[in-house]
Image (cartoon, grey):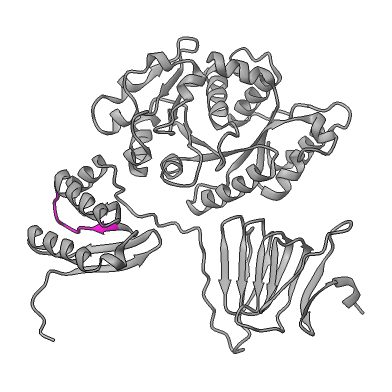
Amino acid sequence: MVMEKKPAINIKGVRDGLLITVGEGEWRDLEAALLQMIEERAAFLEGARVALDVGNHILRAVDLGKLRDRFSEKSITLWATLSNSPVTEKNAQALGLATRIHTPRPERIIHALDTNLPGETAILVHRTVRSGFKISHNGHIVIIGDVNPGGEIFAGGSVVVWGRLKGMVHAGMDGDEKAVVCALEMEPMSLRIAGYTLNLPQRRGKPEPEMVYVQDGRVITEAWKTKVK
Amino acid sequence: MAAKVLTITSGKGGVGKTTTTANLAVSLARDGKKVVCIDGDIGLRNLDVVLGLENRIVYDLVDVIEGRCRLRQAMIRDKRLPELYLIPAAQTRDKNAVSPSDMVRLTDDLRAEFDWVIIDSPAGIERGFRNAIAPADMAVVVTNPEVSAVRDADRIIGLIEAEEKGPARLIINRVNPAMVRRGEMLSAEDVIELLAIELIGIIPEDESVVISTNKGQPVALDGKSRAGEAYHNIARRLNGEKVPFLNLDEKEGLFQKLARMIKPGGN
């Protein structure tokens, strides 16, 4: 393939949607390339939320407004413009565009740690998992704190909650039927182990520490004290 | 003076954010503090109505940010309490007219002159919330003793932590002691058990709140009603005073018990 010199336009996925980065060069060429790109990739970009990083280019409000309108004709939402130029930033703000992408992430995906026990990694989460938060790990997950309704835990292995489990849990998400779920108070909104779903029994009396596991294709709940010998 | 920026938020709508903002602002101003409240609910403004200042609006928050007026021109001075000001929201725009960095700049301009800057956040977790929380030094979450409101409060507390504005403090609004006693309403203890943050006030259900809101005379102005008293107590707690919680339920002493429970937390 013959590469003609094209202005650099990059697309990548970020938490808030897509980030399109525009390189150096004459703005008019870059703008044309950008518009051509959204034309060519209309199907891919349809419905996307786009942040545009224009680097050092100084853009007037009309330039930005034109882009936003052309984007919206293709059902693309331009919601933010990132720039090194305060002028561009000010013009973007005048149009109601955000000028920075949020860095704090409510979703914490915690990566596996190196360990000398392959296949037996675990993470320790010492905090309350509140509604809207998701913890995902391909080993085991140990939580010191509560899992509130609306909180989600996904583990390749087992899940231990030293607290109240009131949210959603999927243990053994890659199909490990030997995974278990333990909690001091077992009141999940939903609980799955591998491909099985726990039918939540109506709680009678005070919640107590329990372990949930799969046996003969059924999900069993067992009070923890019976395990103590 | 170095103002504290306090953001009042909730996630769910209709739990009493605006009423709480108005009454805390009035209570703090009654105690001689210089207070400015900012209505963050652009497009759906109503803090001006609750404070009874709606017919005095000339400029608004968006006018300040877009440079159509000076900050001073948009600040409405309350005639009842000379140390209380309001910066109203724009009604004809939406949340995207303001960015979080605009709000930080705006509050930084106010910090030197006031003791408290109180921001009334809109419902939801989108741009409006992010605008309101960006400049906050302290966040207060308002909830009702209802499962849906508590669920949203839990979400918003998580987001406040994620924005590194935590830990949030909690106000439980519209508690009906008789219903709690009959087991028909979540008790304050149930709510605190789930949310696990510091409680700074419980506001009883009180008809005078509705009446005063409609009149534009916040209940905390005279402090005769139960709710007004409760708001005033919160204002004093915000200023570092130790104020016992109101005993809303003589028979069972629920709130006394609660007050005892909370005290070690430094209230």
Name the magenta segment's main secondary structure: loop
Within the image, what quadrant is residue A217 found in?
Answer: bottom right
Q: Kindly identify the residue that appears in the image at 55 percent across and 43 percent down.
A: B11
Quadrant of residue A103 within the rendered picture:
bottom left
Residue B35 appears in view? no
Q: Magenta span covers which residues?
A: A51-60
| Quadrant position of the C terminus of chain A in the picture | bottom right
Residue located farthest toward the top when viewing the structure as drawn: B79
- A67 relative to A208, above or below: above
Q: Residue at x 31, y 48 (%)?
A: A98
Q: Is residue B33 magenta?
A: no
* x then y, percent, for residue B167: 58, 47
Left or right: where A165 falls relative to B137: right
Q: Residue at x 89, y 56 (%)?
A: A205
As drawn, is B10 to the left or to the right of B233?
Answer: left
Residue B74 against residue A189 in the figure, above or below: above
Q: Position of residue B209 (x, y in %)?
A: 63, 20
Q: Decide whether residue A55 is among the magenta residues.
A: yes
Q: In the drawing, does residue B109 fall left or right of residue B211? A: left
Numbered disc total: 0
**Viewport quadrant of the N terminus of chain A:** bottom left
Give coordinates of residue A101: x percent, y percent: 35, 55
Check the image and report above or below for B237 versus A30: above
Quarter of the image where one finds residue B169:
top right
Residue B71 is at least partly visible in this image: yes
Foreground residue among A217 and B231 = A217
Q: Residue at x 73, y 77 (%)?
A: A180
Q: Name the residue nearer the viewer: A228 or A185.
A: A185
The relative height of residue B214 versus residue A16 in the rendered view (above or below) is: above
**Image spot of residue B157 (x, y percent):** 57, 48
